Image: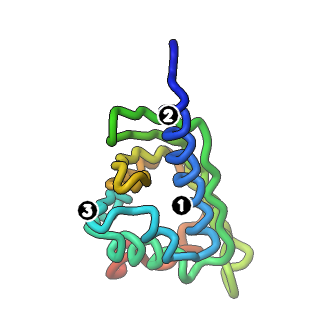
């Protein structure tokens, strides 16, 4: 299989953005998520369809703002580039640690991110993310209640 250098660079840029998205969630750098997504990006993260970066970030924050430290580890990244469009799949293993009275609790999940990308003005931007959850362990109580108290 022969792959040209441009495709390799595209794959690297997309992979880096996947990593940056995970690190931004853990660092609570919400503006970074906006930078990675297109203005009309959508997501399916287990709470229904989210439209636009503001709604995606608000949903993520509804879980993480009340949580202690988190770490989203990304692995086995596969990227397919066709012109100015791309798709990616990556494993995610995330750990959430409680804070305050819940500091002794933790919550882990295993899943896959399936993302769509578009090259806009020479930069790859995420147009859609779906998280497929496969397993969880621990106490979900370390997380916030989710959008509109969804979890409760």
Task: Give the camera-side residue of 131 and 22.
Answer: 22
According to the picture, the residue beneath numbered tag 2 turns out to be 6
Classify mark 3: residues with Cα within 10 Å, few (<14), some (14-19) or many (20+).
few
| Residue shown at 58% from the left, 59% from the top | 20
| Residue shown at 36% from the left, 49% from the top | 119
Residue 21 badge? 1
Query: Which of labels 3 and 2 is toward the front?
Result: 2
Query: Which of labels 2 and 1 is toward the front?
Result: 2
Helix, strand or loop status at disc 1: helix
Lower sequence index among marks 3 and 2: 2
Q: Quadrant of residue 5?
A: top right
Residue 53 rendering spot, x and y as whole percentages: 35, 70
Task: State whether residue 95 is above or below residue 2.
Answer: below
- Report, in whole angstroms, how far the alpha carbon at label 3 lies from the one at label 2: 33 Å
- Report, in whole angstroms, how far the alpha carbon at label 3 lies from the one at label 1: 19 Å
23 left or right, relative to 21? right
Helix, strand or loop status at disc 2: helix
Task: State whether residue 5 is above or below residue 60.
Answer: above
Task: Give the camera-side residue of 134 and 13.
Answer: 13
Q: Residue furthest right?
A: 104
| Residue shown at 56% from the left, 48% from the top | 92
Residue 22 rendering spot, x and y as whole percentages: 57, 60
Helix, strand or loop status at disc 3: strand
Whether residue 152 is visible here, answered yes or no, is no
Classify mark 2: residues with Cα within 10 Å, few (<14), some (14-19) or many (20+).
few
According to the picture, the residue beneath numbered tag 3 turns out to be 49
Q: Quadrant of residue 76?
A: top right
Classify mark 1: residues with Cα within 10 Å, few (<14), some (14-19) or many (20+).
many
């Amino acid at each position: 299989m022969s792959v040209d250098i441009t495709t390799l660079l595209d794959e690297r840029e997309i992979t880096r953005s996947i990593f940056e998205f995970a690190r931004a969630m853990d660092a609570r750098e919400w503006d970074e998520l906006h930078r990675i997504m297109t203005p009309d990006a959508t997501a399916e993260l287990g709470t229904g369809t989210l439209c636009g970066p503001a709604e995606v970030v608000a949903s993520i924050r509804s879980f993480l703002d009340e949580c202690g430290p988190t770490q989203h580890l990304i692995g086995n990244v596969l990227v397919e580039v066709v012109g100015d469009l791309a798709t990616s799949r990556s494993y995610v293993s995330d750990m959430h640690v409680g804070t305050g009275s819940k500091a002794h609790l933790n919550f882990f999940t295993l899943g896959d991110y399936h993302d769509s990308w578009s090259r806009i003005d020479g930069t790859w931007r995420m147009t859609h993310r779906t998280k497929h959850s496969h397993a969880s362990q621990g106490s979900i109580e370390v997380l916030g209640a989710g959008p509109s108290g969804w979890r409760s």
